[in-house]
Image (cartoon, rainbow, N blue to C red):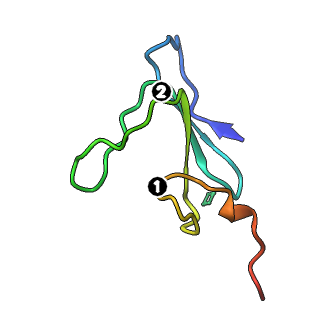
Amino acid sequence: MNSIPSAGADESDVTITVCPDGPLLVRGAARILDSEGNSIGNDRATVALCRCGRTSIAPFCDSSHKKRRRP
Ligand code: FES
């Protein structure tokens, strides 16, 4: 996994980890907004945001990225 490096990170920092062929893991006090600027309720310390487009619970990952595509 690749993480955004942070120098002098503290508790208020947000880190985003890119999972190979998977979601973006967002750790920290990040606010997630929909396209209209409305907050998407979330009180978890870590959230997984889908980047494959196959999830049924957008914008969050539901592990659908693990399913194989048919050739
Ligand atoms: S990244 Fe997991 S369902 Fe899309």
Residue that label 2 marks: 14
For disc 2, the neighbor class at 10 Å (few under 14, some 14 to 19, many from 20) is some
Query: Relative to residue 13, is residue 64 drawn left or right?
Result: right
Residue at 53%, 26% (x, y): give it.
45
Query: Residue 59, relative to residue 1: is it above or below?
Result: below
Which secondary structure, mark 2?
A: loop
Query: Residue 34, relative to residue 4: is it above or below?
Result: below
Query: Relative to residue 62, is residue 43 drawn left or right?
Result: left
Q: Residue furthest bottom?
A: 71
Mark 2: amino acid: Val
The C terminus appears in which quarter of the rendering?
bottom right
Residue 52, picture quadrant: bottom right
Residue that label 1 marks: 59
Mark 1: amino acid: Pro
Whether ligand 1 has any atom under 8 Å from the Cβ at mark 1 is answered as no
Residue at 52%, 14% (x, y): give it.
9
Query: Residue 10, relative to residue 69: is it above or below?
Result: above
Distance in Å between CA atoms under marks 1 and 2:
18 Å
Residue at 55%, 59% (x, y): give it.
51
Task: Please state the quadrant of the image where ligand 1 appears.
Answer: bottom right
| Relative image position of residue 38 (x, y in whole percent) | 24, 46
